[in-house]
Amino acid sequence: MRIVVLPGDGIGPEITAVTVAAVEAASKKFNLGITLDHDLTGLEGYKRHGKTVTPELVKKVEGADGLILGPTDTYIYKGEGQVNPSMFFRKHLDLFANIRPARTYPGVPTRVNAFDLVVVRENTEGFYADRNMASGGSEMLVTPDVVVSLRRITRECCERIARAGFELAQRRRKKVTLVHKANVLKIGDGMFLEVSRAVGKEFPEVAIDEYIVDAMMAHVVRAPEKFDVIVTTNMFGDILSDLTAELSGSIGLGGSVNAGFKHAMAQAAHGSAPDIAGRDIANPFSLILSAALLLDWHGRRKSLPAFNQAARAIEEATVAAVAAHEATGDIDGKLGTRATGEAFAKRILAA
Ligand code: NAD
């Protein structure tokens, strides 16, 4: 498996270095033969190449089996006419399913009951101005005082995200929750519901329930243990998954993979956290768990069970490391980012 590694901005380089060590350890332990191709994007890419994403980088990523992208900053390229790498690769590689698991961990204090759920978020349309149009954005300044923001919802994207959710639920506790705002966005979210229910009929063992997005925020805080797989549109999934990551103990535990039919990108659920960058306190497990999801995706796609085994081993080692407080302070750990990574790589090799 060939993976392109792009460290990103802010805390990106710190947590990416640790993730690379974890992937190398897993590759060695499970004989995966992973090769890592290191390159630059974000501010460093811009400084080096005059562009955040060069055509050469795009070609390299298109030819690879996967991508690990450290968190990138959305604001620092403003005025430079540069693309945001995260948004660019999601759209360009058609990474329609943003899979964001969240669970509680023994040893990490939380405000809620123990839970284990996955947010499955549509990633290629919706209220994201960069994703809806073949050319141009879907947010427009009509006059200096009037803005129109458009949301695109298509039957095709509803269908494929629903299917991704039901397939996942089939391998888990067999329950899908559809989250929507069809009481207000009657046509768009109405179609999301209609298509998702129809896909659900192909999975008779999977139970379905439905919540309006605002009420869902209360339900998930009150009793997150009720949920298994939550399928929703882009913006709702983005917001909900930060909440579920934080409910698990820290947003720094928020792993995520952006998956399409041909490509996938491991990317933490959070941003570049400039407030803690360079201080060796960022939690690297978000990106480590994202990399595990990428290995799992590759194993399923290519029918290579060793990759699925490695992904499971990384998840189990994360649970053990967190319980042993071999982790960062945000989750009651006693180590810095680098030391967390060193202890984790040893743990994987010893597993
Ligand atoms: P953020 O997610 O970077 O940070 C929110 C809070 O969580 C901060 O207090 C931060 O210190 C903390 N945090 C985040 N990751 C952590 C980790 N691994 N360990 C411990 N604490 C962690 O959100 P923000 O500060 O609003 O955004 C910073 C930049 O990131 C912005 O430019 C934003 O647009 C961008 N962003 C990018 C993505 C993405 O590419 N997927 C997602 C969110 C934000």
Image: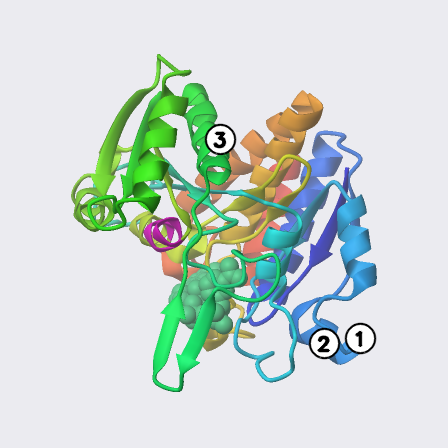
Q: Is residue 97 above or below residue 167?
A: below
Which residue is the extreme one toward the top?
Answer: 204
- Classify the position of ligand 1 by quadrant: top left, top right, bottom left or bottom right: bottom left
Q: From the image, which quarter does the N terminus lie in? A: top right
Q: Which residue is mark 2?
A: 46
Give the residue type that dot 2 points to. Tyr
Q: Position of residue 6 (x, y in %)?
A: 69, 60
- Which residue appears at 56% of the width and 72% of the height? 10
229, 21: nearer the viewer: 229
- Label 2, residues with CA under 10 Å away: few <14, some 14-19, many ≥20: some
Q: Residue at x 33, y 41 (%)?
A: 104
Q: Residue at x 46, y 42 (%)?
A: 154
**Mark 1 in CB contact with mark 3 (< 8 angstroms):** no
Asked whether residue 240 is drawn in magenta, I would say yes
The residue at label 3 has a CB less than 8 Å from ligand 1: no
Secondary structure under badge 3? helix
The residue stretch that appears in magenta: 235-241
In space, the residues marked 3 and 2 are separated at their CA atoms by: 35 Å
Q: Are marks 3 and 2 in contact (CB under 8 Å)?
A: no
Is 277 contained in the magenta span? no
Majority secondary structure of the magenta segment? Answer: helix
Q: Label 1's element?
A: helix
Which secondary structure lies at badge 2? helix
Determine the CA span between mark 1 and mark 3: 37 Å
> Of the residues shown, which amino acid type is indicated by label 3?
Ala
Q: Earlier in the sequence, mark 1 or mark 3?
A: 1
**Badge 1 is on which residue?**
49
* Relative vertical location of residue 28 with respect to residue 72 in this rendering, above or below: above
Which quadrant of the rendered structure holds the C terminus? top right
Badge 3 local density, few (<14 within 10 Å), some, or many (20+)?
many
